[in-house]
Amino acid sequence: MRHRRLSRVIPFVFLAVVLVMTMAVTVFAEGEGESAGGGSFAYATALSLLPPLIAIVLALITKEVYSSLFVGIIAGGLLATNFSFAGTLDTVISDGIITAVSDNAGVFIFLVILGVLVALLNRTGASAAFGKWAQKNIRTRVGAQLATFFLGVLIFIDDYFNCLTVGSVMQPVTDSHKISRAKLAYLIDATAAPVCMIAPISSWAAAVSSYAEGTGYSGLSLFVRAIPYNFYSLLTLVFIVALALMKFDYGPMAVHEKNAVEKGDLFTSGTEHAAEDTGKTGSRGRVFDLVIPIAVLIVVCVIGLVYVGGFFGTDAWGGTDYAGDFIGAFSNTDATLGLPWGGIITLLAVMIYLVCRRTITFKEAMGCFPDGFKAMVPAILILTFAGSLKNMTSQLGSSEFVKSFMSGAAAGLTTFLPAVIFLVAVFISFSTGTSWGTFGILIPIVTSIFPASSELMYIGMSACLAGSVCGDHCSPISDTTIMSSAGARCDHINHVSTQLPYAVTVAAVSFVSFIIAGALGNLIGGALTAVISLIVAVALMLGTMFVIRSMTKKAK
């Protein structure tokens, strides 16, 4: 009890200390309103990564994400303005929070739309009907976990879409088999970004292709050649399947799963927030009343993504015409525009369908809007704060610091450089909560330090991408992590703390695999390097899991 009280007080004590420091510095300052960015003493130094690290450490200690993120934002504003009181307020509000809301407006709209869709399907009873069907046809906990995994793999178009759709569809199934919400959140998160990062037709492949422009390489071909070496993404998929089939858990996840099986407690902690419902449940819906809306959502969102990218003619910005070019349109799309585009059309179509089927009245359908919005408010708040923190980090020139660090590390480390790149990408992505921003920084560096068209080039590229996904996967301020919690309706800190040991296990095996791949790339080269490296990596992953299972059994 005393520990809990202390953990709640820590963020406020820290914030008070920061504010006192600010006022003290302001008294002696010659003038307020120092310009952010290049005018900061912390610009492009290791201190540029301090604000997100403060937020992450506080979140893990206190188990409270809102105040932790806010303290990190304030710390970033103070560093960006050299502890100017007025300058900090202006930077935090204008460059931080307002910009974050503007940048994520499309994601917020899509979140609310999906929240409303879930409320509609609950109100009709379609979700309950699907749960009853799943109980009859998916008879084991292993089957429920594998079904969640395979659905996550199938929805490879976009990680945001993956997180929320898989959560909405599979929640009744996993609940019926007493799988904890923390485990569901992990399954969602582990089949979102990792799957998108090895799918040539996805918003992530498009982003990588765009970042590779101007480097002298074809972005898409570089992405495809790097797939066999993307150890973190590939081994995460191996890990999930093996974990389900081997029927064991470890770390905090084991506690959540034990409580779910033995006590029927799907949450372990944070129940009052995570169990918040999205409205009343009806009984008129059938299984196809859930399947049809989800199928429509998938099809229409894909159409929306390629439409925004210019597949049907001039793109949404009046720029490049990718008419009839599906891959080209994907490389040019913007998920924050395409997903809301598809979501709004889907919502209208589903409402008309359900009202015409008389499974819900028009008045009941309208009542689902506030229910759906309320269910997504926690995710929207966390995304806003996380986006603000990322903006503060950018103001401090974190990308410039990483570039100078990597340039210095490149000399004399050819064989071990892929493993070094992996670690650097993990650290940056974990600290900033953005995988896209991380590989946006590192891709130009990677293409400049490796010999052109060598196998080490592809290994280095995959290390950059894999590390970005890994750090994003672990970070409590990552948008994908946040939306996985929202999709599973799981307490966010529970999701982060239970997922971290699993992600670190896969990351450790991936690091060793990159060392092996780098050595083989120097000795052998060619496609044989990829085959041997991947076989060794999978063997190491499975061997590690057998060792961990043996250790957990002995501990019992």
Image (spheres, grey):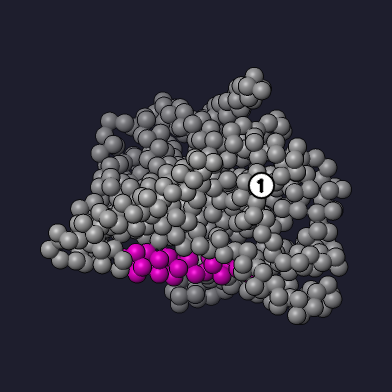
Is 204 magenta? The answer is no
Q: Where's residue 503, x and y in %? A: 53, 38
Mark 1 = which residue?
267
Choose between 434 and 127: the one closer to the eye: 127
Residue drawn at x 47%, y 49% as measured from the top left: 8
From this viewpoint, is residue 204 visible? Answer: no
Q: Is 189 situated above or below 158?
A: above
Give the magenta-colored segment's residue range: 91-114
Q: Which quadrant would residue 340 be assigned to in this image?
A: bottom right
Is 104 magenta? The answer is yes
Q: Where's residue 484, x and y in %? A: 59, 52
Is 271 positioned to the left or the right of 24 in the image? right
Residue type pointed to by label 1: Phe
Residue drawn at x 19%, y 66% as measured from the top left: 32
Q: Which quadrant would residue 544 be assigned to in this image?
A: top right
Q: Where's residue 360, x and y in %? A: 80, 74
Which quadrant: the N terminus? top right
Q: Which quadrant would residue 282 be assigned to in this image?
A: bottom right
